[in-house]
Image (spheres, helix red, strand yellow):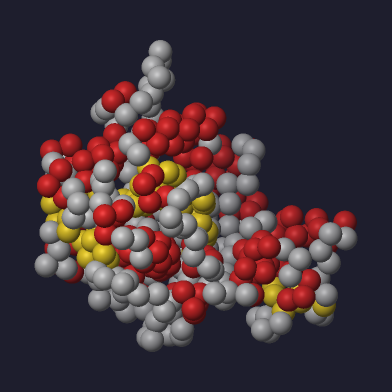
Amino acid sequence: MSSPEHYTIAQVADILGVSKETLRRWDKNGTLVPERMCDNNYRLYHKSQLETFEQARLLFNSQWQREAETTPQRPYTLLELFAGAGGLAIGMEMAGFESLLLNELDHAACQTLRINRPHWNVVEGDIAQIDFAPYRGKVDMISGGFPCQAFSYAGKKLGFEDTRGTLFFEFARAIKEAAPKIFVAENVRGLLAHEGGKTLATISDIISELGYELVSPRVLKAVFYKVPQKRERLFLVGIRKDLADKARFHWPSPYHRILTLRDALKAGELYPDDVPASEGQKYPPRKAAVMAMVPAGGYWRDLPDAVQRDYMQRSYFLGGGKTGMARRLAWDEPSLTLTCAPAQKQTERCHPEETRPLTVREYARIQTFPDNWRFAGSQSAQYKQIGNAVPVNLAYAMGRALVRLLNDIEQLPPAQQEPH
């Protein structure tokens, strides 16, 4: 364990967003040399060494506590699209938003929303069937994570109409019809580079066509926002053009430290109690025997060579690290990004001590869902809902930042706030 002034190689890798291998290389070439080596060759870095890096400075000078005091000047209203199991919605609720409508296609996810928030207006079904015009002038924000579908660029100047048939078109249509003051959309990091950047450029053009100014998109790393998980999400924030020059969006500050799996599953600053017992997947006997040999934080390369060859089969001879295979998590590091199932061969998420996949409630905690948030549907449906969610604390941090933006807009004369 590190002291408040010292950081382990794993912690520094998370703070700076580089691999441990990169840090070892920096150690050798003198770029960043650990201040203190323990008897077991354990690298420890002093806080002062890290202050030359912007990511570390933001962490050490965190404004999180000040921003946590943000309150809406009035109840701000929200339409949430592609709501899933409610990760984004809970965060927005905590920040002070009132949902007028939540739309989701998946039946089990809708059941989850209804069980936990009977008063929410959950509209189950195809977004293409919803008319958003009645909400015009009544909604402050639209939010949601539209699934990234490829556009067909063949011979088209891709404007709003040309994206018909995609879920982005439906998100954009909701914005056009309801004319909210602002919107927030979240997506996978890959959208940035999709089609060599053409997809994001098209999205940006359409947002402008609809009368909104897009804040320069940013990938947020959940580990900086009180989430014990190495998940990255791309956020798009738009402000109606008649308001954009009068109010500026500021991205949320990071939490003062990076949380680990121990913070997620044991009593501490994240949860008052240890993780409650719940159901979870089991390994078949042969796989359990292999996983039992993997140390905490280890993966397939930590197995005996004969076991590696047998377990990996043809993958043994292919390039790449394949670091998700036969992977056991470690107590003192954040979890790797959760997927829709905890025991997929490529993205194994084994408990750090026990030889089993993470349970449903362990999954939920790593995504910072409250312990009283219940999930509907089959076990696999529950894992899928949790794995697809926006981490609640990341959503809460973004929600507070969006409330601050709306508070600034609220200072304008009422006539300037109405959609033109």
Q: Quadrant of residue 241?
A: top left
Relative to residue 25, is residue 99 drawn left or right?
left
Relative to residue 381, is residue 46 drawn left or right?
right
Residue located 43% across and 85% down the image: 267
Residue located 42% across and 32% down the image: 205
Q: Position of residue 87 (x, y in %)?
A: 32, 62
Q: Where is residue 81 in the image (x, y as percent from the top left)?
A: 25, 49
Quadrant of the drawing holding the C terminus = top left
Relative to residue 301, is residue 90 drawn left or right?
left
Task: Relative to 373, say whether 197 is above or below.
Answer: above
Relative to residue 307, is residue 378 drawn left or right?
left
Furthest residue to the top? 155
Residue 334 visible in image: no
Q: Position of residue 112 (x, y in %)?
A: 19, 62
Residue located 40% across and 64% down the image: 408
Residue located 68% across and 80% down the image: 2
Quadrant of the drawing holding the N terminus = bottom right
Q: Where is residue 406 in the image (x, y as percent from the top left)?
A: 35, 62
Q: How many marks?
A: 0
Residue 54 visible in image: yes
Task: Relative to 49, say whether 306 is above or below.
Answer: above
Task: Relative to 109, say whether 128 is above or below.
Answer: above
Task: Relative to 101, say whether 152 is above or below.
Answer: above
* Near-viewer residue (248 or 293): 248
Q: Quadrant of residue 279?
A: bottom left
